[in-house]
């Protein structure tokens, strides 16, 4: 393996240990580790953070280890975004894993080959590892093209990350180009929901970093690669998680499959809109059902 791996960690030694072991088996030549600091109102968190960082000391293969550890808690939005800025300031391309994203062994080769294959093709901005159990609609190909940027195991280049804006400071200008922006989405329903999310990110109501990356890719007409075999299992769905607390979530602990090599590349660089739509409907179905329920309750509520 020749490609650097970036690992994002915090306070979860149990999941970090499993993810680290998968990286250890892959033996990347360079490991860049980003860690957030403990929260001041959690007395036991400093010990958990320390135990998590201690796992990185177990590197026992020929590897350059670079660390970017914060002693104070910056939160998900600022710690991950600043950490990834640091990663791409140090390397031209990287495979990125969070502390709860367990990779299948073939994930690393899949990313490495495609980072090389599309290195100079600026149409491609993101390589997914997790496909949420949804394969492309064309049989026989190793992957398909998508508009979706899943961050449960992924890879990218500095040339793409340069467009990332954690503040999405361009949001108001984008809203003024609503017609062009809206045409990017297959349904008005998706456009309205995603616009609401991005507006909440812009106004600070949502503390995260990944919606900004998705929007940054959209605004460059960037494509993502989606594997037709799921290569990542998110093992972090529990009460300790920041955004994945529901153990019953259909995407929790998805099984992984083996990617076959040599890779079979798609014949055309066209988005598999059917697969993207299926993903959107599955992920946000609960949101829409809750909205419908609220409307029904409101309609029968006594005046």
Image: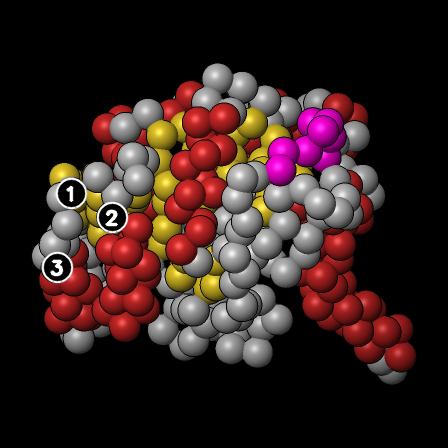
**SS type, badge 2:** loop
Mark found first going from the N terminus, 3 or 1: 3
210 to the left or right of 19: right
- Say whether disc 1 or disc 2 marks the residue closer to the N-terminus: 2
Residue 133 lies in quadrant: bottom right
Secondary structure mostly seen in the magenta stretch? loop
Which residue is farthest bottom?
302
Residue at point 77%, 69% (across, down): 289
Q: Quadrant of residue 65?
A: top left
The residue that label 3 is drawn on is 58
Q: Is residue 208 magenta?
A: no
Q: Dot 3, how many residues are within 10 Å of its Cα: few (below 14), some (14-19), or many (20+)?
A: few
Tell me the crowding category of disc 1: few under 14, some 14 to 19, or many 20 or more residues within 10 angstroms, Cα based. Answer: some
Residue positioned 33% across, 25% down in the render: 92
Quarter of the image with the C terminus is: bottom right
User: Depth check: 26 or 211 in front?
Assistant: 26
User: What is the distance, in whole Å, between disc 3 and disc 1 at their CAs?
Assistant: 11 Å
Please give the label number shown on residue 27.
2
Residue 155 falls in image quadrant: top left
Seen at 66% across and 45% down, the residue is 194
Against 126, residue 163 (above or below) is: above
Give the extent of the magenta segment.
264-271
Disc 2 crowd rating (10 Å Cα; few below 14, some 14-19, many 20+) is many
Give the x, y percent position of residue 189: 80, 48
Q: Which mark is residue 63?
A: 1
């Amino acid at each position: 393996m020749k490609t650097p791996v970036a690992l994002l960690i915090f306070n979860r030694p149990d999941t970090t240990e499993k993810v680290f072991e998968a990286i250890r088996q892959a033996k990347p030549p360079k490991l860049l580790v980003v860690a957030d600091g403990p929260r001041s109102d959690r007395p036991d968190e400093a010990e958990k953070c320390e135990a998590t960082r201690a796992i990185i000391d177990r590197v026992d293969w020929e590897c350059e280890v670079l660390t970017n550890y914060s002693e104070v808690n910056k939160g998900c939005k600022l710690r991950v975004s600043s950490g990834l800025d640091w990663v791409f300031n140090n390397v031209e391309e990287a495979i990125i894993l969070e502390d709860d994203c367990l990779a299948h062994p073939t994930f690393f080769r899949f990313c490495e080959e495609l980072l090389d294959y599309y290195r100079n093709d600026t149409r491609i901005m993101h390589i997914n590892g997790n496909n949420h159990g949804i394969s492309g609609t064309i049989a026989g190909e190793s992957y398909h093209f998508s508009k979706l940027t899943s961050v449960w195991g992924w890879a990218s280049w500095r040339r793409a990350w340069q467009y990332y804006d954690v503040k999405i400071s361009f949001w108001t200008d984008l809203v003024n180009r609503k017609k062009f922006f809206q045409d990017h989405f297959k349904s008005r329903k998706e456009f309205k929901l995603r616009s609401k999310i991005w507006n909440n990110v812009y106004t600070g109501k949502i503390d995260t970093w990944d919606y900004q990356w998705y929007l940054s890719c959209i605004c460059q007409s960037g494509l993502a690669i989606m594997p037709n075999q799921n290569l990542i299992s998110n093992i972090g769905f529990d009460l300790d998680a920041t955004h994945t607390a529901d153990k019953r979530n259909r995407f929790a602990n998805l099984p992984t499959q083996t990617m076959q090599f040599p890779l079979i590349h798609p014949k055309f660089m066209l988005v598999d809109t059917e697969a993207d739509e299926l993903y959107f409907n599955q992920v946000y179905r609960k949101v829409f059902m809750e909205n419908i329920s609220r409307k029904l309750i409101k309609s029968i509520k006594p005046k």
